[in-house]
Amino acid sequence: MPELLGTGVGRGIASGPVLRMADPLGEPDRTPLAEPAPAANERVHAALAAVAEDLTKRGQLAGGDAQAVLEAQALMAQDPTLLDDVHKRIADGSNAERAVYDAFGAFQEILAAMGGYMGERAADLGDVAQRIIAKLRNVPAPGVPESDHPFVLVAHDLAPADTALLDLDKVLALVTRDGGPTSHTAILARAKGITAIVGVAEADTLSEGTVVVVDAAAGVVIADPTEAQLADASRRIAERAAAASEPVTPGALADGTHVPLLANLGNPADAAEAVALGAEGVGLFRTEFLFLDAPTAPTVEAQQRAYVQLLEAFPGKKVVVRALDAGADKPLSFLTDKHEENPALGRRGLRALRNHESVLRDQLTALAAADAETEADLWVMAPMVADAEETEYFVRIARELGIRTAGVMAEVPSLALMADQVFHHADFVSIGTNDLTQYTLAADRLLGTVAHYQNPWHPAVLRLVAQLGAAGADAGKAVGICGEAAADPLLAVVLVGLGATTLSMTPAALADVRAELRRHTLDQARDMARAALAAPTAAAAKAAALAAHVV
């Protein structure tokens, strides 16, 4: 049977009939403006306001990562630069729909040419334009089709507003032609636990009604599966459901070796769900939500209140907070440089904080004060750290301001290569596999055209993880994983075999990882790790790990 390849999101598997996403609205015609310009501008203003309000409401309903994504889209709908361009085009004689289409299209081209994170956002901007034009036409916006039976949704791509509010009783899985592993479709699907495969180049060949098996773990869509393939899918679906319904226990290997399973969180409001899914603490708390879209840094008092809310949700448990990681895909007007040629390699993370030390000191002061108010075990780490000198700088200031446990993130290969020196200063290291993979393989992690390089199974990445694991063991200090690699159950076992002492992931992945860890002893995990390290490619590393211990 035909097999279509793409990038799987998570470990889910599903089967069902295809339902295709409706095509986008047609391109507006170029009929000259037939109404007074003020009237056209007023209609555009009303449409923009309605779309922004709708996106904001959808975000509030969705919560979590989806809320941040949709609120960002709502801001796009009200961008004054775009609105000025629409006004100018109307003044030049374009009708309202055409003015919106051309203004948003011109900005999309600029974003697409920038590549990386901004290139990925071009699709989001296109969705906003479609919604505004639909309002102007007084027709429904393109979106997820309705159905009275469960289905596999196939689309060119999926807008954040649609992904965030999918009916999980109806949508069995997602298959998209476009998008990379860090597109918003992938991010939101992972957070919601939706079986998904993105970047399926031949997705357009899937006809409506065709039964498919969507195997995210293998990154394969099987069209017209055999009875045996359907039976295998049903068995695996049942196994995953049984694992998810088992009592939540601490993460551990088959021999009883404890491997704490922690959650990656971006907002204190997400803590309750993480706890319910069995998170034993927090391995990565992203503090950017307090700073993004703000003209100035929040006050110490405002930050302290947010950190207290987070820490109170995890009494007696480890909570690792990342200092502000601004720059690259998260520029801040008051902190990062404008118009950097290559911001992913520019002044981001600790580099930006060091250039504006007062922002760093305020954040650490707020964290120390929140720690004093609560009973959690607070750990604080710096992002984008290159070597031992930068490590010493951060740890020294953190201790000066009252942080008891201070460490760094390993995202830059140089830090892994200098790991023995880094551990002279750091209390711990947490490996951000997304960026470590990006920088090791020189492939922008947010650019779909090089998505095939963004694979943490690559032996080059695994060798750096092994070096960090060995240095941590020699120093008697913790080495955590907080990148998306920890959410891959089989890779999670290999990472433990390489020396990782904790694993942190999106909460939706906790059950799958917990179940996989219980199938392997520490010795077996080390055997799998050794086999993967000796492989020449990412695919070969995964195959070698599987072959090293077939269970």
Image (cartoon, grey):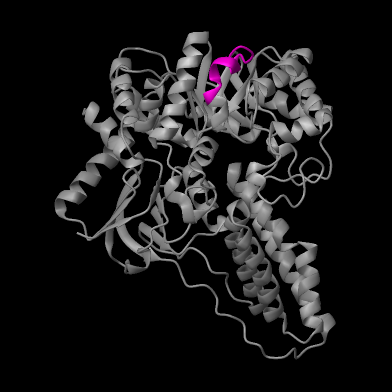
* Front-lying residue, 171 or 179: 179
Magenta stretch: give its range: 417-427
Q: Residue at x 57, y 72 (%)?
A: 140
Quadrant where the image shows the N terminus: bottom left
Residue 475 appears left or right of 93: left
Q: Residue at x 44, y 42 (%)?
A: 193
Q: Is residue 255 magenta?
A: no
Q: Residue at x 80, y 46 (%)?
A: 333
Q: Residue at x 60, y 66 (%)?
A: 126
* Front-lying residue, 360 or 439: 439
Residue 471 percent across, percent down from the top left: 49, 15
Residue 501 appears left or right of 494: right
Quadrant where the image shows the C terminus: top left
Note whether 101 is above or below 311 in the view shown: below
Query: Quarter of the image holding residue 408?
Result: top right
Residue 378 percent across, percent down from the top left: 65, 17
Is residue 166 among what the camera can see? Answer: no
Residue 414 percent across, percent down from the top left: 56, 29
Note whether 55 is above or below 408 in the view shown: below
